[in-house]
């Protein structure tokens, strides 16, 4: 099955040029992840779900959201969390929800008992966690279990009881990993990946075999038949490779130490403003393309544009001068990473979605 990304915001810092701030849904075979949840997230989500029903022919069921993955604590990436969580409570959510994000190693030391008082950035998620607790973001208040987790990339703390835990894996086969990035606050990129899927049982090649032999081969077991050894693998189509997507959050270029098939990377500035990008630890479109090459990404999708950019045409042109497979995202777009690892870019319009060629 494919991985599909629903892009609900492509603006940096504040809504501008008709674009909203950050927030994406990654739809997997097992459920969904939300990556970042900026102000007004649930308004955009309601509209997108309605359009998916009317034009996409299917519903996005919020009960299938397993976790909210935060890239950092700037409010254009986090301010929509609590209102949406409260809406899920009103809608009768019962399933557990994970909320996972980065903090500093000093904060982790303090949470584990260090007597050294850490220096905490005002936008550190540990401060927002305290605020969310005071405003009712608790299991008791919401009526469904919420597991808050903060980490420094190596160590993760269950904020509910203060214990150190491995990075949670909210799904069985779809895996997440956090990769530290370079920004003005503690930050990370999130990698979401599916495992390789074995091929389908080939009924045509086994059509002349007895049913009991077919059943054994279909179960993945080798079998002896009429003096021959039949290998189960010979009766399956080729396996389907796993797929992976990384969503960068805010970061300077070439800061992600991982590979992926699809990289969704911030492109706040053009190369003509590279000095500003470097000062604020953001990326240019060209920098995003260089990062994609470092990550061995088959495809690059640009997002998180500065309000000074009235279109993303120049960003797209700049990145395509470096990487061969680049798309520029707009609010409401969808990206489908197919089983053959090709990318389908569905562009949003008032009449639904059309494939970008």
Image (tube, rainbow, N blue to C red):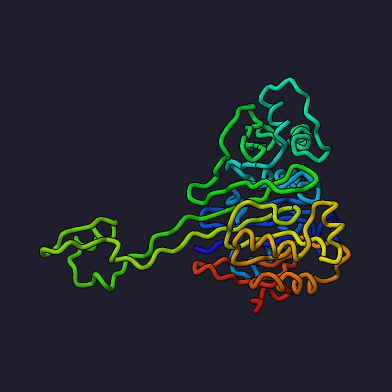
Give the percent coordinates (x, y) of residue 13. 84, 54
Position of 257 with respect to 30 (left or right) is: right
Q: Nearer the viewer, residue 245 or 69?
A: 245
Give the percent coordinates (x, y) of residue 205. 26, 72
Give the percent coordinates (x, y) of residue 163. 61, 27
Residue at x-position 60% and y-position 71%: 344
Residue 304 makes an appearance in the image: yes
Reply above or below: 282 against 271: above
Residue at x-position 65% and y-position 37%: 149
Give the percent coordinates (x, y) of residue 86. 72, 43
Residue 87 makes an appearance in the image: no
Query: Residue furthest toward the right?
Result: 308
Position of 15 with respect to 150 (left or right) is: right
Residue 233 occupies quadrant? bottom left
Q: Nearer the viewer, residue 271 or 46?
A: 271
Query: Residue furthest toward the top?
Result: 115
Q: Nearer the viewer, residue 8 or 326?
A: 326
Q: Nearer the viewer, residue 51 or 29?
A: 29
Residue at x-position 59% and y-position 66%: 298
Count of residue discs? 0
Query: Residue furthest toward the bottom?
Result: 357
Reply above or below: 340 against 96: below
Residue 266 occupies quadrant? bottom right
Residue 308 occupies quadrant? bottom right
Quadrant location of the C terminus? bottom right
Residue at x-position 71% and y-position 26%: 110
């Amino acid at each position: 099955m494919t991985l599909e990304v629903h892009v609900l915001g492509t603006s940096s810092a504040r809504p501008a040029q008709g674009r909203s701030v950050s927030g994406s849904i990654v739809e997997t075979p097992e459920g969904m992840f939300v990556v970042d949840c900026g102000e007004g997230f649930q308004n955009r989500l309601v509209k997108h779900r309605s359009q998916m029903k009317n034009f996409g022919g299917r519903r996005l069921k919020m009960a299938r959201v397993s976790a909210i993955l935060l890239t950092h604590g700037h409010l254009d990436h986090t301010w929509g969390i609590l209102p949406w969580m409260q809406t899920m409570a009103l809608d009768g959510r019962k399933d557990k929800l994970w909320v996972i994000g980065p903090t500093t190693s000093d904060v982790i030391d303090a949470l584990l008992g260090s007597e050294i008082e850490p220096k905490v950035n005002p936008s550190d998620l540990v401060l927002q966690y305290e605020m969310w607790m005071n405003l009712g973001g608790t299991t008791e208040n919401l009526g469904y279990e919420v597991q808050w987790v903060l980490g420094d990339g190596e160590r993760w703390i269950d904020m509910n009881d203060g214990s150190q835990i491995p990075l949670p894996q909210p799904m069985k086969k779809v895996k997440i990993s956090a990769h530290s990035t370079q920004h003005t606050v503690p930050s990370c990129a999130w990698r979401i990946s599916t495992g390789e899927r074995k091929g389908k049982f080939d009924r045509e090649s086994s059509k002349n075999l007895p049913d009991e032999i077919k059943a054994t081969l279909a179960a993945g077991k080798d079998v002896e038949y009429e003096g021959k050894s039949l290998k189960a693998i010979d009766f399956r189509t080729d396996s389907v490779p796993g797929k992976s997507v990384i969503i960068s959050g805010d970061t300077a270029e070439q800061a992600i130490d991982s590979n992926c098939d699809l990289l969704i990377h911030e492109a706040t500035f053009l190369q003509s403003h590279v000095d500003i990008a470097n000062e604020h630890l953001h990326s240019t479109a060209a920098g995003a393309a260089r990062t994609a090459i470092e990550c061995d990404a088959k495809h690059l999708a640009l997002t998180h544009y500065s309000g000074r950019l009235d279109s993303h045409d120049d960003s797209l042109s700049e990145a395509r001068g470096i990487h061969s497979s680049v798309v520029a995202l707009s609010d409401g777009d969808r990206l489908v990473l197919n089983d053959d690892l090709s990318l389908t870019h569905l562009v949003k319009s008032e009449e639904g979605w059309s494939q970008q060629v």
